[in-house]
Image (cartoon, coloured by chain):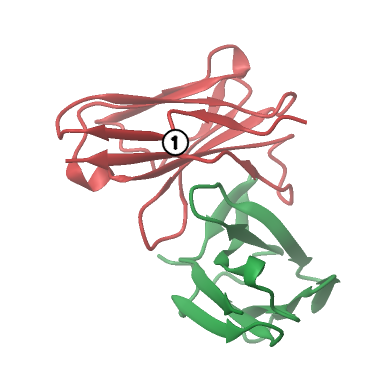
Chain colours: A red, B green
């Protein structure tokens, strides 16, 4: 079974530039999550999708971050404009239904460096 | 508000000995806890979980203990192996499948 796919693996940009990350969840998984992991911290949820609808985006800095999940499959996360503090690993995860005790399956992440 | 806390950033143990990783939580409504393991340049992978109705769950070399009165859980790895060297996160579901993660503990197992 194919896992969660993410691209690119690494991205280096200058502040005020824009960047986009792509995620393809496990086939059949209805729920998709974007997490931000800053060095030395645990992953922090940015946004949760159920199919193609947003369930929770309360932690997403909406002045600069946006995300979409067209057709309820692939998802993109965009940052525009980027700030130095956005340097982090952006992890995509998926689960079957988004139920309380389900395991989340993570992709390898995109490591973003903002200079 | 850090609802799940791992107060030890790092732990070093000798191969063959026991590794004990600790996690504290503040929300008594959590009814399930998970441990994830993360190698460099990879995403976290699920390791073991425990329901709040239990006080122990074992899977091979890995055992998780839950002390609800102390709001504390621990992961025991016996015997520790060099391949166990990784970052370990404890996590709890916040509702709707969302996980709240601790800060992580980096385990180094020395040969």
Name the residue nearer the viewer: B91 or A5. Answer: A5
Residue drawn at (73%, 47%), measured in percent from left and top?
A: A102
- Could you say which quadrant of the image residue B96 lies in? top right
- Could you say which quadrant of the image residue A107 lies in? top right
* Picture coordinates of residue B69, whole percent (x, y): 67, 86
* Picture coordinates of residue A45, whole percent (x, y): 47, 46
Residue B71 visible from this viewpoint: no
Residue drawn at (31%, 32%), measured in percent from left and top?
A: A62
The relative height of residue B38 versus residue B77 in the rendered view (above or below) is above
Determine whether the residue tagged by mark 1 lies in a helix, strand or loop: loop
Residue drawn at (78%, 31%), measured in percent from left and top?
A: A1
Residue drawn at (55%, 56%), measured in percent from left and top?
A: B39
Residue bearing mark 1: A57
Local packing at callout 1 (Cα closer than 10 Å; few below 14, some 14-19, many 20+) is some
* Picture coordinates of residue A91, whole percent (x, y): 49, 41
Q: Does residue B87 appear to the left or right of B49 in the view shown?
A: left
Chain of residue at mark 1: A
- Residue at the top extreme? A71
């Amino acid at each position: 079974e194919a896992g969660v796919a993410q691209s690119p693996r690494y991205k280096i940009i200058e502040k005020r530039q824009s960047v986009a990350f792509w995620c393809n969840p496990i086939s059949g998984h209805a729920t998709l999550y974007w997490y931000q992991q800053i060095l030395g911290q645990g992953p922090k949820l940015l946004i949760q999708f159920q199919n193609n609808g947003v369930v929770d985006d309360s932690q997403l800095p909406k002045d600069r971050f946006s995300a979409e999940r067209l057709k309820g499959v692939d998802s993109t996360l965009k940052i525009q404009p980027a700030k130095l503090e956005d340097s982090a690993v952006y992890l995509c995860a998926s689960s079957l239904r988004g139920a309380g005790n389900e395991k989340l399956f993570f992709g390898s992440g995109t490591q973003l460096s903002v200079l | 508000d850090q609802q799940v806390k791992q107060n030890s950033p790092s732990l070093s143990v000798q191969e063959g000995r026991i590794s004990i990783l600790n996690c504290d939580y503040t929300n008594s409504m959590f009814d399930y806890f998970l441990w994830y393991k993360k190698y460099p340049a990879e995403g976290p992978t699920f390791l073991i979980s425990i329901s709040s109705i239990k006080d122990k769950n074992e899977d091979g070399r890995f055992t998780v203990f839950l002390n609800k009165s102390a709001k504390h859980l621990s992961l025991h790895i016996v015997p520790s192996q060099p391949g166990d060297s990784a970052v370990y996160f404890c996590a709890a579901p916040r509702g709707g499948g969302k996980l709240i993660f601790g800060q992580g503990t980096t385990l180094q197992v020395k040969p």
